[in-house]
Amino acid sequence: MAESKFSAELGAMGCSVIIVKGSVNNLEDVEDAIKKAPCPIRGVFHFFMVQMDSPLLDMTWKDWKDASEPRVNGTWNLHRALHGQPLDHFWLASSVVTVAYQPGQSNYKAGCAFIESFCQYRHSLGLPAFVLSIRSIEDIGYLAENPSALRSIKLQGLHLVRENGFLESVEASLFISTSGGRSSTSDSFENLSSGDQADTRGESSQLKVFLQSVSEGNAIETLAKEESIGFLSMEIGTKFNDFLLRPDAPVDPDLKLSEMGLDSLTAIELRRWLGQVFGLQVSVLEMIEAASLKEVGRIVATRLGEKINLRDM
């Protein structure tokens, strides 16, 4: 019944729905599903929900395997079966349990840690991949259907998101589901003027124009100006608010990031974004200790100038 309702909803959106029964843990099943696709596959969404919770010392091998196998073998099977296909997206679902303590879920956490590492592996091969660490969703899915589980999450004080927030995260992730050639170690200014560099895709047009002008001119002199530091501060603050799902919130460059709502997860997201867009490494500790958002902008401006100067030497 659930499958038919979901298929009908997708069909109403204009999708061609083909349901193939099998297990992602079985390579032959995955290959069979791919063969039944009526047109070339350009994207993959790998969702899974197998939980076999128990204390590690009491956990059986079967419990460990059942919870981790879809994440490990299943991901490998999709990777191998789609080898050579020109994918736009290889989207993987992980969980915040990789960074938040959740007793009794060592098998689940191990599988998610593998997923996150596998994303980096695909990047190293120049292949697209993105992993989203999903928080507990309050109003749909497993928790909405299991009140006791929802109550347990709330009693632990864990942050919950709603369906709209989750869908916004998925939509945003598709803009950065790019290959390793565009990762944080890449040259963010290569082919910037022609628009080929995807690091700035989805960013403001003002930021794109600013980065282009900086890369073509005297970078150190331009980035040392207070107006440049102020501009970068506002762009960083705007992106920070996007991560907190409050895009319309005002940005005060004199506030510390902690005063704006910085936590460990948003710090990691902001660090990753700075790496993708500017090709810079800014540590979480530096963000936390910075006297203000403007000081973070100054750090970015200084390192950006040094980076471009070294490139042009």
Image (cartoon, rainbow, N blue to C red):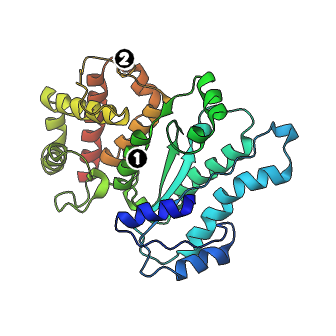
Direction from residue 275 to residue 35 in the image, left or right: right
Say left or right for 278 vs 271: left
> Residue placed at 31% from the left, 27% from the top?
296
| Residue 52 image position (x, y, % from top left) | 75, 46
User: Foreground residue, 220 or 53?
Assistant: 53
Name which residue type carries label 2. Answer: Glu
Q: Which residue is mark 1?
A: 167
Q: Tell whether label 2 touches label 1 (CB within 8 Å).
A: no
Q: Position of residue 213 (x, y in %)?
A: 13, 47
Q: Nearer the viewer, mark 1 or mark 2?
A: 1
Quarter of the figure with the N terminus: bottom right
- Secondary structure of residue under mark 2: loop
Q: Position of residue 248 (x, y in %)?
A: 24, 30
Relative to 75, residue 210 above or below = above
Q: Secondary structure at mark 1?
A: helix
Q: Nearer the viewer, residue 211 or 84?
A: 84
Is residue 244 left or right of 228 when viewed as pictured? right
Q: Residues within 10 Å of mark 2 (few under 14, many from 20)?
A: few
Q: Residues within 10 Å of mark 1 (few under 14, many from 20)?
A: few
Count of numbered circles in the view? 2
Single out the residue that lies furthest toward the front: 1
Residue annotated with mark 2: 259
Please name the amino acid that badge 1 sits on.
Answer: Leu
**Rendered residue at 72%/40% (across/down):** 105
Q: Nearer the viewer, residue 156 or 273?
A: 156
